[in-house]
Image: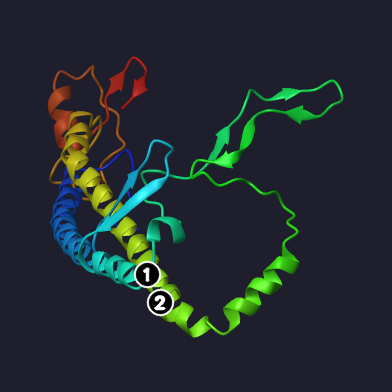
Amino acid sequence: MAFNFFGTFTIAQWEAFKAFTAIQKYDLTARKDWLEKQLNNNGKFTTTYDSDNLPVKFTATGYAGKLLEAYRILGGFPEREMLLRTRDKPVFLIRDEVERRNPDGTITGGYGETYTNGRRWRGNITFDRDLGLFVERIKGWQLESIKLKRERLEFKIKAALDYSDQLEQEIVKINTVITELEFWIDFVEVNMESHATDGDEFGLSIGDVADYTDENAGDEIASKNQRTFTRSGSV
């Protein structure tokens, strides 16, 4: 593996790694610029919520905004029909009372039966098959219109929302890496304990322990890449 060192390395190895990292930083900046252009073209979603945490308005820029507008022109109401959620308001079960164990061994309390988007948890078994068959008869002759006016646009809108989320997450991650990069480089250099000199690029001389009984110990350490001793052991 390239740059395969962990705690003991030479100055030359470290400088080579720093040079490689500088190139990566340049590539990351270019990647971020491309991502921001993609996000601008695709569009960024914004959701407005009411006091009950229910979405009351979807807006989007770019391509996604045009898709939402087309959906509304065709009679759709995305805030009520599509169940879209942006990442700022995830859906979860609302907590009820404190969970407790009853004398008969049953457990009550804990999570309730209502989600934060207002919908209820219906359990694992539903008995709406017969009613569903009647609804299917009404839908059957309208399938092409449903696909044209709703389904295809819904798919495109949700795909645009997902793509927008991914672009934003990567942009945030790149910003974090770039912001922290210089700090960690400085941190490593300040805390280097043992390394060889610039002339020993591959660290072949690392290993000998310095002899402090020699009056020229300091020069020996520098010229031979020797380790020194501390109270806790060798470094």
Name the amino acid type tagged 2.
Lys
Q: Which residue is mark 2?
A: 149
- In the rendered image of this protein, does residue 212 appear above or below residue 135? above
Q: Identify the amino acid type marked 1.
A: Gly
Helix, strand or loop under label 1: loop
Q: Nearer the viewer, residue 224 or 3?
A: 3
> How are the colours assigned in the image?
rainbow
In the image, residue 155 sits, relative to residue 165, either above or below, namely below
Residue at position x 18%, y 59% from top?
36
Q: In the rendering, which numbered label is found on residue 75?
A: 1
Q: Residues within 10 Å of mark 1 (few under 14, many from 20)?
A: few
Quadrant placement of the N terminus: bottom left
**Image quadrant in which you'd find residue 59:** bottom left
Is residue 3 among what the camera can see? no
Percent from the top left, x then y, of residue 133? 70, 73
- x, y percent for residue 216: 13, 22
Q: Is residue 58 left or right of residue 115?
A: left
Q: Residues within 10 Å of mark 2 (few under 14, many from 20)?
A: some
Which of marks 1 and 2 precedes in the sequence?
A: 1
- Residue 174 falls left or right of residue 163: left
Residue at 36 percent of width and 49 percent of height: 56
Q: In terms of depth relative to the viewer, which is nearer, 178 or 232?
A: 178
* Camera sees residue 127: yes
The numbered mark at residue 216 is none
Q: Residue at x 68, y 28 (%)?
A: 109
Contact check, label 2 and label 1, Cβ < 8 Å: yes
Work out which quarter of the rendered image holds the C terminus and state it.
Answer: top left
Residue at position x 64%, y 75% in the image = 136
The answer to whether 36 is drawn above or below residue 191 in the figure is below
- Residue 60 placed where, x, y %? 25, 59
Most extreme residue toward the right is 104
